[in-house]
Every structure is written in structure tokens, then in C-alpha cells.
Image: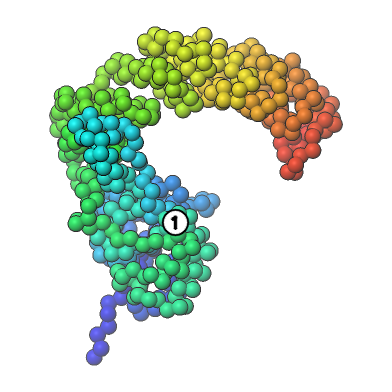
Amino acid sequence: MVAHAERKTVCTITINSSDEKETFRRNLPESDYEFVELVERGKPDWFGSACRKDVRCDVLVVSGHFDDGTEFYSDRLGARESLPVDAMERAACSRSCPSVFAQLKEVYLFGCNTLEPAPLRLASGEIARSLIRSGYSAADAERFARELEQAYGESNRDRMRRVFKDVPVIYGFSSKAPLGAAAGPALERYFRAGPDTEFGSGRASARLVSTLAGASMTATPGVRDSDPDASARRDMCELADERASAAQKLAFVHRLLARETAEVRMQLDRIEKYVASLTAAERLRSDVVEALRDIADDEGARERYLAFARDADALSTRARMTDLAAALGWLTPAEKRIELARMFGDRLRARDVGVTEVDLACSLNDDHALDAERMRLGAANADRVAPAAVLACLGSADARTRVLRALASADADEVRIAQTYLRHRPLADPGELAEVAGAVLRMDASEAQVRALETLAGYRLSDRQTLEGLTRLFSLAKSVDVQRAIAGVLIRSDTAGMASAALARTLRTHRLKSPDGADVIDILIRRLSS
């Protein structure tokens, strides 16, 4: 009597295209392979339900868009199912999904950038400086920074290797992946040529990779305990393991904060995400209160951390680290405001301010809590538009006046700064809006004027003088870009007080020939004519 090998189970997670799954199903004998779809349409907890099923997956095929590296998702209208990487990490670290993860031999990730090797986080200049302050030589600091980047840079490939620990073969794409309609036929060609390894055996197929090499397919094994970056997976699981209590996770955060601050910086995303996830109920538990107090009382860790934060290259990093310091009890609300004011003061004195800094200043001061700290900054470089915009974000009326004038500047960079500021602090006073619009109308035709007009398009203008000025400017314009920008303002304006038919005739008579077909001008003319 001949003993037959047990059938292998191919689990599929079909978020978007089913072409890959159906191609595998057509080409693999039913006697040897059983297919199980894990997604249950319309069920929000489909992944948890799949983990609870009595199914042991030998092969896992995941199909979905993966452009930003945070989740598999669908672009199909009405499709709500997705698979976040965070959920995969929690399941893998908690061992709460043995049916899917326990005995996998092969994983197929059909999505863009699923095995993209470039790190998401780079070891920037402040990391090397921190290591040198800690006593490392310049050469050793550079070497250690590279090691940190390799361990904690967290490329998509790294994250997938850590999710699928010990899996012999993970297939994916290092950049753009083929859509299902193209991936299916490519897989058909592979099967017609005769597979070079048994499907689901855990042995990588060089011919499969070669068949889809033009679409950036690659293969890698899951991380093993003996691998150099296995410690990074252990760190990941300390915060992702759902079996650990909040106090245990905070104890790990405290141990992490005792390491080189450069390493803390590389894991900042995970730390701040976990601390922010603590619920109000968890924060009331006595063991959590004690764990947070232990961190707050650690003066050595506090001083190292704040020194690093103040030396951060990116202002956004310094702001994030300041916010986390407050969440950990290292800064009172008043101290946090002072720290943020100091941050902007340092950048103003360094004359290193641009759109990013203006955007951050306005965002951090949405509640105007930093207005009272503005005097700590002085008026450093306020004659320039970007520093003035930072001060305006922090509540300076004089600086606001300077920034509003900049919207009509001939310098496109100054206009860009004013645009950024106005996204956060829009024009609300009708007189102020009319004054700014008048200045924009008097500009010479240029890229800067187009940008300024695009900013005015965000407002529903109704001032008759301004609307007539826009009409005159349209008839005199020598640039189709300027005319389009004017049309973009008029189409959102209240033109009820103007003769629509006459306005339509003016636009039709003076419009410049469009180089690329119908545009917003045509839409405006049709709307006025009707």
C-alpha cells in the first residue's frame, strides 16, 4: 500500500487582486494542495478570526497594495479590508496566531515594496555626535551608527523578516510590483516551464525569482535567532507582545532609555507610539503609575535624552522628542512650552528657517499655548519672511503683517512661506482679505503671482472691487497659467453681483489658447453661461 504525503495548506489573504491566488490554484494539484481564504468580506475582525481557526498554513499568499509600507490595502471601491503590519507584528510576537504563522515554509507577498531594502530611518548626524559625546572616537561612532541603522533602520524587508521569523523563504518585491493582471500570466509562464522546486517545500525557486525579476521580485529568509539583527526583533516584540502587561512594557521602555541615546533615537517611533497608546484606565493602575514614576525619577536618562533632543538635526525630531519627554514625566507642561520656545529660538538664531519650520511652528501652536513664550525668542531676523512667519505662528501681530505682505512678493520662495502660514492662520477679516488680494493683483505676472492667486482661490471672494480687478487682470494677462489661476479664484467666488453673461463673454474673448485642452477656464465659462 502506497503512503500518500499529507496535503499542504495554502492560506491566502486576498486584499486586492485574486489573480495570483487563482493562478496558484489552477496550477497546483488539488490532491496535494488545499486552499483556504482567510479574509472574510465585511467582517472587521477577519484577521483575528483567521488566527482562531483550526487551520495550519504551510504557504501564505498575501495580495494587496503596499505602497507606503504600513499595511496591505485595496483600491477597489467599497473594499474595507486591510492588513496592517502592526497587526502582523502583534500576532507574530504574541504567538496568538499559530494557525497562520506556526509552520509556514513559504510566504508570497504580492505588493509594491514588500521587500524594499532601503531603511525607513537613517542614522543622521545627531546620532554620531551623541556617540562621540559618550566617549566614542569619530571612527567608532561612525561604525556604531552604521550598525544601528542596519539593526533599527526598519526597511520593509526587515519588518517582514521579523514578522515571519524562521520562515525559510519569503518572496516579495524590492520596488514596484506587477498588478494582479500582470502577475497572474507571469506565474502561468513559471508553472508551464515546470517548477524547479516543489511548491511549499521551503526551498527558494531561482527560476520563479528570475521569471519576475523584471518586476523586482526577490526572496529572503525570515530572521533566525542566530542572525545579527535578532536582537532588534526581540526589542520589537517587547512592545508588540500582547501577553505582556503595560507595566512590563514600560519597564522595557525604561531599560531601553538606559542604553545609548543614539539607539533610543533609532527606536523613537516605537517608544512614542506605545506611550501614546496607554489608555486612561491603564494609567490609573498602581503598577503602571509606579513604572512611569521610575522613568520620571531617572535623572541620568532624562539629561542624556534632552541633550540629544536639543542637538537633533531635524526640528520635527526635536519636537517629537520633547513631546515624548513630557509624556514620560520629564517635563511639566510649563517646561515643555519653554523647551519648544527654546527650540525655535535656537533655529532662528542659526538663521536656519524655511517652510518646514513655519509649518511646524503653526502646528505646534494651534492652541496658542506658546504665545506667552514668544518673548523668549526676541525679534531675531524678523526682517526676513521665514523667521517672521515663525513669530507670526507664535502670535506676533507685527510679524503677521510682514508675512501677509510677502504673499505679493516677487520672490516665489517668500510667497511659498506666506502660503504655508496662511494654511494654518487664514485670512478671516474681509478688509484684510481685500487688502491682500489688491496687492496680489498689482504683482507683475510671474510664477510668484500664480502661487499667490492659488492661495486666494481658497477663499470665497465677494468684494466687488476685487472681482472686477481679477476680471481686468484676466483680460490683460499674457500667460495662460495666470489666467487659469484667476479662473480658479473666480470659480469659488461669489459673483452673484456681477453680470454673468458679460463676465463669460470677457473671459471667452480674452482667454489664451490652452496648450493641453479644456481646463478650469472652460468650466468657469460654461458655469457663467448657464
**Does residue 225 appear in this view?**
yes
Q: Which x, y percent locates residue 34?
A: 35, 72
* Quarter in which the N terminus is drawn: bottom left
Question: Residue visible at 19% across and 57% down?
Answer: 226
How is the rendered protein coloured?
rainbow
Amino acid at dot 1: Gly
Disc 1: which residue: 111
Q: Residue at x 61, y 22 (%)?
A: 411
Give the quadrant of the C terminus. Answer: top right
Pick the residue in front: 169 or 101.
Answer: 169
Q: Position of residue 101 (x, y in %)?
A: 27, 60
Q: Nearer the viewer, residue 234 or 280?
A: 234
Within-10-Å neighbours for mark 1: few <14, some 14–19, many 20+? many
Q: Secondary structure at mark 1?
A: loop
The residue nearer to you, when weighing 184 against 51, is 184
Eyeballing the image, is 381 above or below 4?
Answer: above
Of the pair 14 and 158, the residue shown nearer to us: 158
Q: Judge from the rendering whether residue 1 lies leftward or rightward of residue 174; answer left or right.
A: left
154 relative position to 359: left or right: left
Which residue is depicted at the point 24% across and 85% down? 3
Location of residue 146 by image quarter? top left
Vertical side of 142 occupied by 451: above or below: above
The image quarter containing residue 429 is top right
Q: Position of residue 188 (x, y in %)?
A: 48, 73
Does residue 395 show up?
A: no
Marks counted in the figure total 1
Q: Position of residue 41 (x, y in %)?
A: 43, 56
The quarter of the displayed image where residue 477 is located: top right
Give the residue drawn at x 80%, y 33%: 511
